[in-house]
Amino acid sequence: MPISSAFAQRLSKNLPDIADHFGTPFHLYDESGIRETGATLKTAFAQVVQFQEFFAVKALPNPHILHILREMGFGFDCSSIPELILARQTGAGGSDIMFTSNNTAPEEFAAALGNGGCILNLDDISLIDKVPYLPEKVAFRYNPGARRTGNAIIGKPEEAKFGVPHDQLIAAYQHALARGAQHFGLHTMLVSNERDYRYMLETTQMLLNVAMWLRAETGITLDFINIGGGFGIPYRPEDTPLDLAALSHGMTSLLENFGTEYGSVPALYMENGRYLTGRHGVLVTRAINHKDSYRRYIGVDANMSALMRPGMYGAYHHITVHDKHDATELEIVDVVGSLCENNDKFAIQRSLPHIEAGDLLLIHDTGAHGHAMGFNYNGRLRPQELLLRTDGSVTRIRRAETLDDYFATLNFAPEDWQP
Ligand SMILES: *Cc1c(COP(=O)(O)O)cnc(C)c1O
């Protein structure tokens, strides 16, 4: 299932009124759904000795959403200065913030260490000496490379720019120890939008094996392992959801077995973005044009500036038409925005009910990596964001961009350089 039927129901009754009140297009997020998924995640890992989710701020960097997640006890995974500011505005600090940057600049380290600090997750051995000082808790992002991935882990870690390669890992911890770090963690992120729980179990086992090796080589006992984010959601109606119960069961027993052998159990950290909020958002857009060319096109009032994933990755986002769920006659159409790029399409050759100008289309599962990825190419502005509260009211939590926003960077004091 794409968005849950409960969310669809909560939305459908008042959608035309909401659209009339706020205007289209908009992303709308479902507070009840976000809270339910958050509670499900926490319950699933309640058996683990110490569990913490650090929401990946990049997925949905809106303060109102971050406040909800903070209220639920989650920390934040940040990788830039604005993300650190957003996380700290919720009151999070110190051990609630994981700073997982790469190709890090000095001012980013300064921002990460200031204002209450963070858990510092370093991406390379060369960065240890570039940090002004090491905070209490330090982790390294591990890149296992090709040799150690077995056959199951997808992607090609050896081609990824992230992480400390296997052969430098021991030296990295030794160097951090020599520089005064006292508490250590180990991080990796090897999957993205993965719905097969066995990959996450493999990642966990891999990190636990590294923990053993690390202690043998350096004497360091890890405080935590961080298996990264990447838990997948079912974007397509036929996709099976991640089996969270099997995952938490498997992980709990991996950690228990490890504890018996190792003498202690590291805390289990994760930093999911998509899994927490992805299904709890929709992009609502109105059909404004319809064109019969070699294909039939439905033109809507949103475009790629609101949602990059279809154009950028060819990602599937389910689309429904408000009040036309029961339509029996379907048409094959492309649903398009107005950018002068042919990949500005929300759907390609999709079967949808007959759509007329004025109809409201729901583009599903835009609660993560949706609005946040938007851009201004072609002079297109990003839309507003709304929050459907648990009491049924709707709050605007970000306004749409205006022409003044677009032209703001052209407004500056003149400056020249002469040779
Ligand atoms: C993007 C990212 C995440 C979140 O990914 P999701 O697919 O949203 O779970 C977590 N950790 C790191 C380091 C990331 O870059």
Image (cartoon, rainbow, N blue to C red):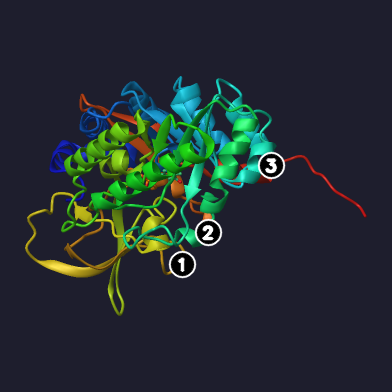
The picture quadrant for ligand 1 comes to: top left
| Residue at the spot 54% in from the left edge and 46% down from the top edge | 169
Q: Position of residue 105 (x, y in %)?
A: 66, 41
The answer for how far apart the CA atoms under marks 2 and 1 are is 9 Å
Quarter of the picture holding the C terminus: bottom right
Q: Is residue 396 above or below residue 8?
A: above
Residue type indicated by callout 3: Asn
The answer for how far apart the CA atoms under marks 3 and 1 are is 28 Å
Residue at the spot of label 2: 378
Q: Residues within 10 Å of mark 3 (few under 14, many from 20)?
A: few
Q: Earlier in the sequence, mark 3 or mark 2?
A: 2
Would you say residue 372 is visible in this rendering?
yes
Q: Is residue 216 left or right of residue 127?
A: left
Residue at the spot of label 3: 411
Would you say residue 16 is visible in this rendering?
no
- Point out which mark residue 54 bears: none
- Dot 1: element: loop
Q: Earlier in the sequence, mark 2 or mark 1?
A: 1
Q: Is residue 297 left or right of residue 77?
A: left
Residue at the spot of label 1: 341
The reply to whether callout 2 and callout 1 are in contact (CB within 8 Å) is yes
The reply to whether callout 3 and callout 2 are in contact (CB within 8 Å) is no
Residue type indicated by callout 2: Asn
Q: Position of residue 154 (x, y in %)?
A: 36, 60
